[in-house]
Image: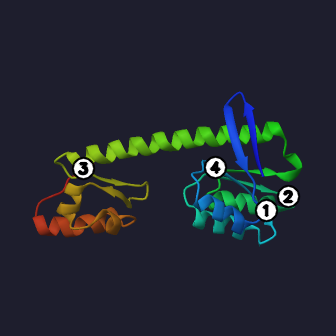
């Protein structure tokens, strides 16, 4: 069953599936912007429903719908990557429209953040100096390509390692002091 609705934010077309299997099959064959999934389907229940859907169609923003008694499961789904949740007893056109607007806003912010991170990565990889960054605990979070060559560590290998460990081999190999800012 498909429905169309128009509100002040624009037209939306919704398709409904009664089972997780039917929904994932449809989603594999169509471009889709967002998924609204009930965690109580005939062929799947609870957090497993969200996890199976996310694995089958990764990267699509998903809103979870569940009963008030399952709000703890909805909160866990947020930790697994859901964008929002609605409780069945509080489901009305206002809350549904609000949830859609929130998802659109989050998607826009996430895309802008990705673009900014990509620009920063390109810039840092284009300069001739080694650049490393750490978290507040002094664990490496980033190395540019010059830092990778200088330390002998790849970004993936160094990620999460103490800065001293990553720089230790570099200092010994170059026999020069390394300035840490």
Q: Is residue 138 above or below residue 110?
A: below
Q: Please report contact status of discs 4 and 2: CB closer than 8 Å, yes or no.
A: no
Q: Which mark is residue 34?
A: 4
Residue 84, position in %: x, y?
Answer: 69, 50
Nearer to me, 33 or 82? 33
Mark 4 → mark 1, Cα distance in angstroms: 17 Å
Q: Quadrant of residue 6?
A: top right
Q: Is residue 1 above or below residue 40?
A: above
Name the secondary structure under disc 2.
Answer: loop
First along the sequence among labels 1 and 2: 1
Nearer to me, 177 or 140? 140
| Disc nearest the viewer among 4 and 3 | 4
Q: Please report contact status of discs 4 and 1: CB closer than 8 Å, yes or no.
A: no
Nearer to me, 143 or 117? 117
Residue 40, position in %: x, y?
Answer: 81, 65
Mark 4 → mark 3, Cα distance in angstroms: 34 Å
Q: Please report contact status of discs 1 and 3: CB closer than 8 Å, yes or no.
A: no
- The structure residue drawn at horizontal position 59% and vertical position 42%, both measured from the top left corner, is 106
Q: Residues within 10 Å of mark 2 (few under 14, many from 20)?
A: some
- The residue pinned by badge 2 equals 67
């Amino acid at each position: 069953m498909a429905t169309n609705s128009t509100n002040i934010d624009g037209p939306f077309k919704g398709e409904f599936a009664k089972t997780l299997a039917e929904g994932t099959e449809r989603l594999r064959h169509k471009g889709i912007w967002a998924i609204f999934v009930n965690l109580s389907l005939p062929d799947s229940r609870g957090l497993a429903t969200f996890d199976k859907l996310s694995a089958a169609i990764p990267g699509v923003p998903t809103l979870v719908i569940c009963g008030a008694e399952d709000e703890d499961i909805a909160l866990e789904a947020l930790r697994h990557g859901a964008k929002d949740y609605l409780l069945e007893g509080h489901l009305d056109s206002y809350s549904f429209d609000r949830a859609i607007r929130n998802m659109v806003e989050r998607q826009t912010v996430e895309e802008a953040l990705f673009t900014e991170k990509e620009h920063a990565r390109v810039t840092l990889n284009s300069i001739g100096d080694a650049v490393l960054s750490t978290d507040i605990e002094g664990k490496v979070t980033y190395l540019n390509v010059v830092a990778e060559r200088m330390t002998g560590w790849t970004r993936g290998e160094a990620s999460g390692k103490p800065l001293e460990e990553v720089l230790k081999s570099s200092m010994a190999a170059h026999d020069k002091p390394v300035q840490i800012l």
